[in-house]
Amino acid sequence: MVRLSRYDIADVPQHVIQRGNNRCVTFVADEDYAFYLECLGDAAGRR
């Protein structure tokens, strides 16, 4: 079953949750987390 599209309303913040499979660790090293934040910031800047 396909997930329904989320609403994307301009100037309304969205709550983002990052979780691994079966709630396993997602970021092994600080560099992993820094890279994730950089990608997230780039994506947010494209809006």
Image (cartoon, rainbow, N blue to C red):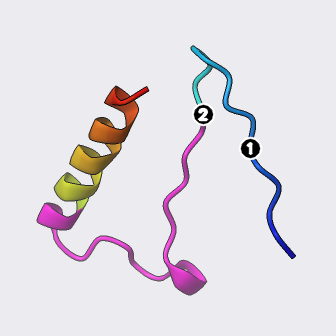
Residue labelled with disc 1? 6
**Quarter holding residue 40:** top left
Does 21 sit above or below residue 4? Answer: below
Q: What is the x, y in percent for residue 46? A: 36, 30
Quarter occupied by residue 7: top right
- Is 22 situated left or right of 42 in this image? right
Q: CA distance from mark 2 to mark 1?
A: 10 Å
Element at label 2:
loop
Res 14 label = 2
- Pinpoint residue 18: horizontal percent, then vertical percent: 49, 60
Q: Which mark is residue 29?
A: none
Is 29 contained in the magenta span? yes
Q: Main secondary structure of the magenta part?
A: loop
Q: Which residue is farthest left? A: 31
The residue lying at 27 percent from left, 49 percent from top is: 39
Q: Nearer the viewer, residue 8 or 12?
A: 8
The 10 Å Cα crowd at callout 1, few under 14, some 14 to 19, many 20 or more, is few
Observer-nearest residue: 26 or 14? 14
22 inside magenta stretch? yes
Amino acid type shown at disc 2:
Gln
State whether residue 11 is above or below residue 16.
above
At x 68% / y 22%, what residue is drawn?
A: 9
Magenta residues?
A: 15-32
> Label 2 crowding class (10 Å Cα cut-off): few <14, some 14-19, many 20+?
few
